Image (tube, coloured by chain):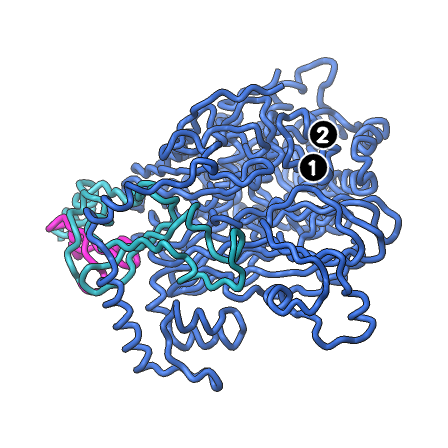
Chain colours: A blue, B cyan
Amino acid sequence: MRPNPKKLLEWIKPGAPTDEELECMKLLQPGDYEIYTEKLNNFLLESKEVFLKLGVSSMLRSGDLVTGIYAPSGDMVAAWCGTYLHAVVGQLPIKYVAETWIKDPTVGCKDGDIFYCSDPLYGGIHNCDQIVVMPVFNDDELIAWTNAAVHQPETGACEPGGMPLTAKTRHDEGMLLSPIKIGENFRLREDLVEMCVNLMSRAPRMQAIDMRARLSAADRLRTRLVALAQEKGNDFVKGLFRRILIEAEEGTRRRIREWNDGTYRAVCFMDIVGEKHKLVRNYLTLHKKDDRLIWDFTGTSPETDSPQHCMPHALAANVAIHLMSYSFHDLPVSGGIFAPMEWIVPDGCMFNPHYEAAQSNSAPSCHGAMTLGTICMSKLMFDSPQRELVAAATGNTGVGIIVSGENQWGVLIADFLAFGLNTEGHGARSDMDGIDAYGFSHCPTGRAPDVEDIENEFQFFNLVAKLCKDSGGFGKYRGGAGTETIYSVNYVNYALYNSHVKGSKVRNCIGLFGGYPPGTLPGIEVLHTDLWEKLKRGDKDIPTGAVQLISERTIKGDYKISSIFQKTHVMENGDIWVVFSGGGAGYGDVLERAPEMVMDDLRREIISHWTAENVYHVAYDPETLEADVEKTKQLRKKERENRKARAMTWAEFEKEWSQLRPPEDILDYYGSWPDGKKTREIIRL
Amino acid sequence: MSSVRQITEYLNIDLEKELWCCNRCGYELISARENYKKGCLVYIRKDPTTIYNSVLTGPFSFSPDPDWAMLVEFYCPNCGVMIENEMLPPGHPVTHDIELDIDKLKEKYLTAKSDK
């Protein structure tokens, strides 16, 4: 029986300690907790390396993955992250197996069993994220579970790449596995592997290899835990696990208690629904009371006939990326962090749709919620000892560029181009700029692949890969720059390409305390080009950036400027397209940015001269890039006076602003204006 | 312990007076029980290209589409510092982003002060 969404959300929290666990905690001697939690972390690091070295698909190779250790109850004890969201939801299929299949005589659970799953309705994120789960037995007692999870970039859906923008229901999304036993005696069952590989006929090699990579990682972790239990005893392991959960919960509560009680709100907007440009709203009201946080997403736009939805547990897991990498980064990566948290996610909103809804774009649908979590938590933490953890939002464009077809080696592929994905700009912080080309919004540690790796694996030539000028949100501290890459189809006659990247109309990444959000991202393609001829001739005017490409147009071809968000379509040999990864948002007033920092941005080509002059209002010598501090003070004083002259009082503003409204045609999926309430039923076939 | 708490980069709360104040110049904006934005000067940046320079023009560029969103900027009426901004669809209500439990704050900081 499928677990209901409320139960899945509740399962994110750890269960209460048992008397036996509390007794076992007494076995830990002084120093044991510190030594053996570090030992667990080393086990995790080793299993991550095994995973990384054995897999083949791009997100796996970039490290956008997780390996985790879970208590027999399924509570998360420790994880290598990687992708924090996978660590959090990893608990749910385990709790389902523990509650359901262990007791079922037709399934059961014994040493050497291997479970496998991918369905969000059973606790996953979306159809692409495949998770292997192994029970850990020592002396015939179940002492733990291990898992290994990573996005599989093909699911046999109605479009290549597993995340079909045209999906209307879950039946368009390909393989969705409820937790099944896929192996016994430490071996995968080849008949079931064949079933999965057969379903992934657009990229069978990737499925076959990555399944084994997941298993190898989870099994390496299992062997280390067995060795630990044999050395220290099962009871010691039980006590250690519970101590970790308690330390995380107590640490979280202690920190929350220090912060100011109150209510914090943020709103942001997403510009895509399915394959259309439409406006939807994400809204968060965060209540902080004593040692509790209550996350209320009331006011978020309703569900639609698109794949841009997620389940409430997936929403919480995405918000956890902020919690685990900022607010509680120094506490154990464990379920204990969630004990003081409540979640309000109204039925029928895009974060809590009907079970038949398509959810293949679940992770990208949560980018707005991730922004809101970062902004509300930063406003909460500013007046606290955690001020140094205050930050504006990371890029949160989710640079999902999916390519497919036959590569130059004659192998079928359907995969992400992981460079843009792992090089979004970081949000500016309360005391410094955001990191340029920081990483993947879901995975702070993700590594962008080298150009050579991309060209070796895929049928593309990588003309440009560099930081994108003016892409980080401006502010006293600048949002980290995103990147721009230019690709061309090489070696083969054609390839398929689609893009899930948001933000051509409005970005869902917002600034903090007067810092500006980053700019939007257009889509650029040049078809039927003379690129190869120019390269053969050794022409010196080959563009080295996207702006140069579109402004100088030295490459002949049909230039197409549209949305960065693109449905699956064919690109022919020599066709060019540009990928932008979004910059992070800015922090603080631009007029407080140190002139020397602006000059440094110019030297590094992170910003344009136009921005230095018109946004930052800095006077400088354009030849030497030396700032004139006194003249800058005067320019900025004048700009502050200009601000006051052009601005209105609140009453005047309200009168003018309340007369405005967006065009009706972009509000089709928004819900009621402006509060985003459900206005119609979605009938799914 | 001071009765003035810095709540954001640009906002203080004077707990004794129960007022939002500018952190940079001390200007008293509005009651701490109100949305501080109501005490600011407000500017609707209807043309985002004044911040986002775009070599492209037309429906898709490096600058947000003003039909979809405009920047609303909140300035201190005295010193002109930008206290906050919001990227909002035209006409969308401004967010009451920070609503502190003032009584709890007073209890936490003023009581602690008087205890000293």
Which of these two is toward me, A331 or B66? B66
- Indicate the quadrant where residue A616 lies: bottom left
The image shows residue A14 at horizontal and vertical percentages of: 50, 31
The image shows residue A671 at horizontal and vertical percentages of: 43, 30
Q: CA distance from mark 2 to mark 1?
A: 7 Å
Q: Residue at x 42, y 50 (%)?
A: B66
Q: Residue at x 76, y 30 (%)?
A: A112
Kindly identify which residue carries mark 2.
Answer: A174
Which of these two is toward me, A376 or A658? A658
Q: Which comes sooner in the sequence, label 2 or label 1?
A: 1
The image shows residue A174 at horizontal and vertical percentages of: 72, 29
- The N terminus of chain A: image quadrant: top right
Left or right, A659 with respect to A51, comes to left
Residue A16 appears in the picture as rendered: no
| Range drawn in magenta | B1-25
Mark 2 vs 1: CB contact within 8 A: yes
- In the displayed structure, would residue A646 be above or below residue A89? below
Residue B14 is a magenta residue: yes
- In the displayed structure, would residue A337 be above or below residue A121? below
Kindly identify which residue carries mark 1.
Answer: A162
Amino acid of disc 1: Gly
Residue A440 appears in the picture as rendered: yes
